[in-house]
Image (spheres, rainbow, N blue to C red):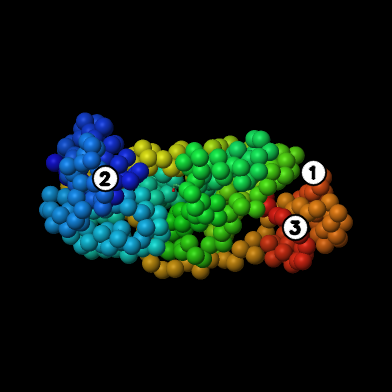
């Protein structure tokens, strides 16, 4: 019998309990062992909940119980979650999590701690919700040199951009809509400013290199400056606008960025709409492969956590260390201003001649709602910002 403890009975934690209980017969038969949630740790009481008797408030009840071999950390944050994860690993209990903040900050340390204690630390649900991406990176893609990862890693902003692309709706209205639907938090900063996607691409870039890519080293730009008129220009160009998190290895130098991009409509990420996420990976032998699905939501994310529970239970039985190449050595990222690409730029039509004079390689594409839009030839980000210094210009990168 595999006995599991779930730390945090919020959206994901309650989903984990639901998946284990509702799919119990199937999970048990695939594990060749029965599985049960023995404890749920939460500060709150849950009167009337069918699992209220499993709720404990003292983490030591879990840590001191030798029957618990797997702990699911679904608390979030990097405070108590960090302490409880270390305590469990030090006791030889394997841990899995959906907590991207903790994984991004302390991933290599927790993986090493698990190894020292003969157990494992897994984090499939920390990136892309229910989409399998961490395990494929560690196993199926192991023979590949990963040249590039491009992802739509945030459901809230993808929903917002999709709505804006459809109806000429402005940013503030679509944010209100996303909040009413429960996608965006009341304080939506982590999503709309790109921080959530930044943490997720930091984790993927770390697995891509086997070293540590820190979120604070990544250039991050959110969607707050995108306006309805940008979609009108994108439409003229046969392009969509997506918040893209990317990491690229070029001649041994890694660059990483989160920023809105205008994608050509035949790019595989262009058709990823609403709250869906997708991760487009280019390997040097395999070529392109794309992972697509629900990047957030209770049961989708919980399903990924439970897939880790099953891996951990099997690994504990077979006494194996699961593959994960992620050392603490910090990667020095390439300065994004050296990236060479084409840009969409727009300015008030009264300023268009000045912009044309400053950017000799820009082709005018249209005038819409008092704005004139241009496409540049390939140039570096630095060359562009130097050329338009002091001018009121909006820019979106092309891909
Ligand atoms: N706020 C995140 C999103 C949830 O919208 O994608 C999943 O990390």
Q: Nearer the viewer, residue 293 or 188?
A: 188
**What whole-number distance in Å separates the C-alpha atoms at marks 3 and 1?**
15 Å
Residue 295 seen in the current view: yes
Q: Residue at x 61, y 52 (%)?
A: 224
Q: In terms of depth relative to the viewer, which is nearer, 318 or 278? A: 278
| Image position of 281 (left or right of 301) | right
Question: Would you say the residues marked 3 and 2 are in contact, meaning their CB atoms lie under 8 Å apart?
Answer: no
1 vs 2, front mark: 1
Q: Splitting the image into 4 quarters, where does residue 334 fall?
A: bottom right
Upstream in sequence: badge 3 or badge 2 = 2
The residue pinned by badge 3 equals: 393
What mark, if any, has residue 306 been given in the picture? none
User: What residue is shown at x 32% (from left), y 50% (from top)?
Assistant: 74
Residue carrying label 2: 309
Q: Residues within 10 Å of mark 2 (few under 14, many from 20)?
A: many
Q: Which residue is mark 1?
A: 368
Which SS class for mark 2?
Answer: helix
Q: Quadrant where the N terminus lies? A: top left
Could you classify mark 1 by the number of other residues whose Cα lies within 10 Å: few (under 14), some (14-19), or many (20 or more)?
some
Mark 3 or mark 1: name the one nearer the start of the chain. Answer: 1
> How far across and how far down the image is residue 269, in percent?
57, 41
Q: Is residue 122 visible?
A: no
């Amino acid at each position: 019998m595999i006995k599991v403890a779930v730390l945090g009975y919020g959206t994901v934690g309650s989903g984990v309990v639901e998946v284990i209980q509702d799919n119990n017969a199937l999970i048990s038969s695939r594990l060749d062992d029965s599985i049960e949630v023995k404890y749920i740790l939460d500060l709150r009481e849950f009167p009337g909940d069918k699992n209220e008797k499993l709720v404990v408030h003292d983490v030591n009840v879990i840590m001191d119980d030798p029957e618990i071999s797997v702990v699911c950390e679904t608390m979030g944050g990097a405070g108590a979650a960090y302490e409880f994860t270390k305590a469990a690993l030090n006791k030889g209990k394997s841990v899995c999590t959906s907590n991207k903040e903790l994984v991004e900050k302390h991933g290599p340390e927790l993986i090493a701690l698990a190894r020292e204690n003969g157990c494992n630390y897994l984090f499939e649900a920390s990136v892309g919700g229910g989409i399998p991406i961490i395990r494929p990176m560690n196993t199926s893609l192991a023979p590949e040199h990963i040249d590039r990862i491009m992802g739509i890693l945030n459901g809230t902003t993808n929903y917002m951009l999709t709505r804006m692309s459809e109806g000429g709706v402005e940013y503030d209205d679509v944010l209100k809509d996303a909040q009413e639907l429960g996608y965006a938090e009341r304080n939506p900063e982590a999503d709309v400013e790109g921080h959530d996607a930044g943490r997720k691409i930091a984790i993927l870039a770390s697995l891509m290199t086997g070293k540590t890519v820190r979120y604070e080293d990544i250039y991050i730009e959110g969607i707050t400056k995108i306006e309805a008129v940008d979609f009108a220009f994108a439409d003229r160009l046969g392009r969509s606008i997506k918040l893209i998190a990317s990491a690229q290895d070029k001649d041994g130098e890694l660059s990483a960025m989160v920023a809105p991009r205008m994608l050509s409509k035949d790019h595989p990420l262009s058709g990823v709409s609403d709250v869906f996420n997708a991760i487009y990976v280019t390997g040097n032998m395999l070529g392109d492969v794309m992972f697509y699905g629900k990047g957030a939501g209770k049961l989708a994310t919980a399903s990924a956590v439970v897939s880790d529970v099953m891996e951990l239970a099997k690994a504990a039985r077979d006494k194996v260390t699961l593959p994960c190449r992620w050392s603490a050595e910090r990667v020095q990222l390439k300065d994004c201003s050296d990236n060479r690409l084409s840009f969409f730029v727009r300015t008030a039509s009264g300023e268009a001649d000045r912009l044309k004079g400053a950017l000799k390689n820009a082709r005018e594409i249209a005038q819409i709602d008092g704005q004139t839009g241009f496409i540049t030839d390939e140039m570096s980000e630095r060359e562009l910002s130097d050329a338009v210094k002091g001018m009121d210009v909006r820019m979106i990168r092309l891909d």
